[in-house]
Image: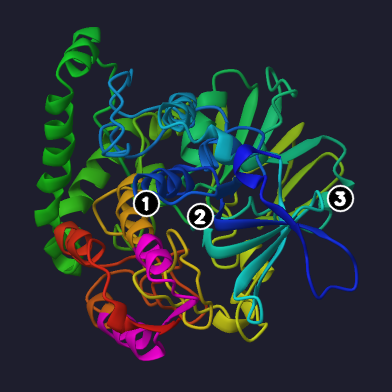
Amino acid sequence: MNAQSKTATKASKSSESTEVTEVNVLIIGAGPSGLSTCIKLKEQGVANIVILDAASRIGGTWALNDYPGLFCDVPSEMYSLGFAPNPNWTRTYAPQAEIQKYLEGVAHQFNIVKHIQLNTRVKDAHWNSKLGRWVITTDKGLVYHAKFFVPATGFIGEAKMPEFPGQEKFKGTKFHSGMWNHEHDLTGERVAVIGSGASAIQFLPAIQPKVKHLISFQRTPSWVLPKPDFALPKVVNQVFRRVPLLQKVVRESALLSLEPSLPIFMRENLLRAATHPMGLLNIRLNIKDKAMREKLTPDHTLGCKRPMFSNNWYKALAQPNVNVLFQGLSHITETGVVADDGTEYPVDTIIFGTGYAVAEPAIYRIIKGATGRSLSDTWQGNPRAYMGMAIHGFPNMFMMLGPNSQNTVGSVMWTAEQQSIYISKAIKMLLDKKVNVVDVKKSVQDNFNADIDQRLERMPVRADICKSYYLDASGRNHIIWPEYGFVIKHKLSHLRTAEYDLSY
């Protein structure tokens, strides 16, 4: 048990004598959100903080995901915490290993490693109104009573393994890209890749040169734009180390320069005019076959689905050892895969690039609020929150990167940082004022979402345009907060206690 967990007591009013650890704040997740929140809480003078993470290393999604070709699709300077710049990026778009190393370095730099317990999975988290505490139980039998609870697991859940008829009969190797089998050598193999989303466009080009033959199932092609990715000269790193202020100026300038693009995202005709020519040019430059170009051209507006960036996706698809099938996977046999048209393709390995649990991460079923209902039962597939953090009926809880928390042009790192500032200030004030229970007012949450909905109606992320993980069960965009970054930053810099019900 770490240094912050030594305040142990015996649980009172319990049928069994259970050792309980009392903490001020318990955070789930040692990724950008959890680390940033812990750092900001310590800056506010809040002590007794614990971070629990199921992974074996620090980094959140960047610790769990390590498939070949994994890079960030946001420029490196923007994909960092403003208070912890990294002068050591080797490329304009950082690879997974560097991001994981960066986040691990941040934890050491700000001396919060002692707050983190890895290899620890939360089994249950529920609000106990009698105690006025969150009761969190882990798979190791540890029990925590937390005055404040911060789920910082992000909006991308666990890898979602699909179920195709005959899948269990396949005698070859199969795995999800989010759980990459590094022990399996793909050299000289016949490989089927199911899916053409953000993961597939990275790992398919990475494995294409080594496999004998590759089958790519692409039922719905996506827009893929080129990106200015190149190795950073060492002189840039040297300058940033000597003049850290310059690096901060570069980062803030990059973020600010994207602000004027918000109106484009709010007008479908402008978005098509601004982005589709780039997407079409990217296809034309890399795909010589006219029929294939037409099949690779999406029929939806760019931005309805997650925009994707790659300089080698189309090049890989055009290689002679790649066969692109513009149809779905019907079923799987003992020795191969069968397309919707009935054609069977013998393969040695199947890689599922079928995405992650976004609409219903497992954590939603674990967290139970004041009524005893879980987030899943409360939301019923239609997640709602106030500023992506506070959820009515879940007292003393602030969710990181919750519903409608992502702005259109920033990065997850930026959002996590702004939310951590708000949360740390709120918890510090509530502790100082000895507030026992805080719960966002339902009217405040409803009004916030009503305003968001009005803005979302103008965006091309709609069920009538395309099917997207941005959309919840009702067809509403539950990911985007469609306001300017400086407006969001202002709102997350000011806590208004009148928006919450407080109990002293």
Which sits in the foreground, 294 or 108?
108
**Residue 495 image offset from top left, x and y in percent:** 27, 69
Which sits in the foreground, 294 or 496?
496
Residue 186, by quadrant, is top right
Mark 1 nearby-residue class (10 Å; few <14, some 14–19, many ≥20)? many
Give the number of the mark in front: 1 or 3: 1
**Amino acid type of disc 3?**
Glu
Mark 2 nearby-residue class (10 Å; few <14, some 14–19, many ≥20)? many
Please tell me whether mark 3 sits on a helix, a strand or a loop: helix
Tell me which residue sits at (50%, 79%) in the image.
382
Q: How far apart are marks 2 and 3 (CA)?
A: 34 Å
> Magenta stretch: residue 440 in it?
yes
Q: Earlier in the sequence, mark 2 or mark 3?
A: 2
Q: Which of marks 2 and 1 is nearer the N terminus?
A: 2
Which sits in the foreground, 320 or 464?
464
**Amino acid type of disc 1?**
Ala
Disc sitting over residue 152 in the figure: 2
Q: Quadrant of the N terminus?
A: top right
Residue 59 visible (yes or no):
yes
Horizontal side, residue 122 vs residue 14: left or right: left
Tell me which residue sits at (28%, 78%) in the image.
452
Tell me which residue sits at (23%, 61%) in the image.
493
Disc sitting over residue 416 in the figure: 1
Magenta-colored span: 426-451
**Residue 82 image offset from top left, x and y in percent:** 26, 39
